[in-house]
Amino acid sequence: MKGYYVGGKTGTAQISGPGGYTAETNHTFVGFAPIVDPKFAMIVKFEKPQRTWADSTAAPVFGEIADFILDYYHVPPER
């Protein structure tokens, strides 16, 4: 996110079924911003998305919502 230091972590996990793990996954991104004196924390979760990794599903959604929140609350850029 331009102008802010953000902390976060993606997660991609296989879904277990009756016979073990399936090819389906859940994707998550949990993060907060700004790093110094955070104004919010958020988790974004997708169940059985069509894409392979959370960096292409949950992380971009976090970025869009975080941009809105920081603008809405007039949080000045850190850098």
Image: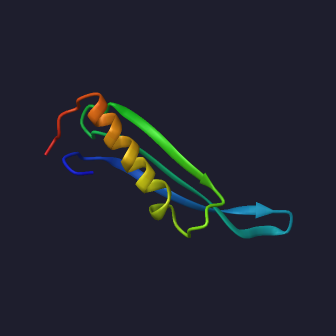
The image position of residue 76, as x and y in percent, is 17, 34
The image position of residue 60, as x and y in percent, is 41, 55
The image position of residue 23, as x and y in percent, is 70, 72
Left/right placement of residue 49 relative to residue 57 reads right
Query: Residue at the spot x=27%, y=41% of the render?
Result: 35
Outermost residue, top side: 73
Query: Residue at the spot x=81%, y=63% of the render?
Result: 17
Question: Looking at the image, how many numbered discs can be counted on the residues?
Answer: 0
The front one of 29 and 51 is 51
The image position of residue 67, as x and y in percent, is 32, 43
Left/right placement of residue 58 relative to residue 16 reads left
Query: Residue at the spot x=28%, y=27% of the render?
Result: 73
User: Which colouring convention does the figure follow?
Assistant: rainbow
Q: Quadrant of residue 68?
A: top left
Left/right placement of residue 77 relative to residue 34 reads left
The front one of 64 and 17 is 64
In the image, residue 53 sits, relative to residue 11, either above or below, namely below
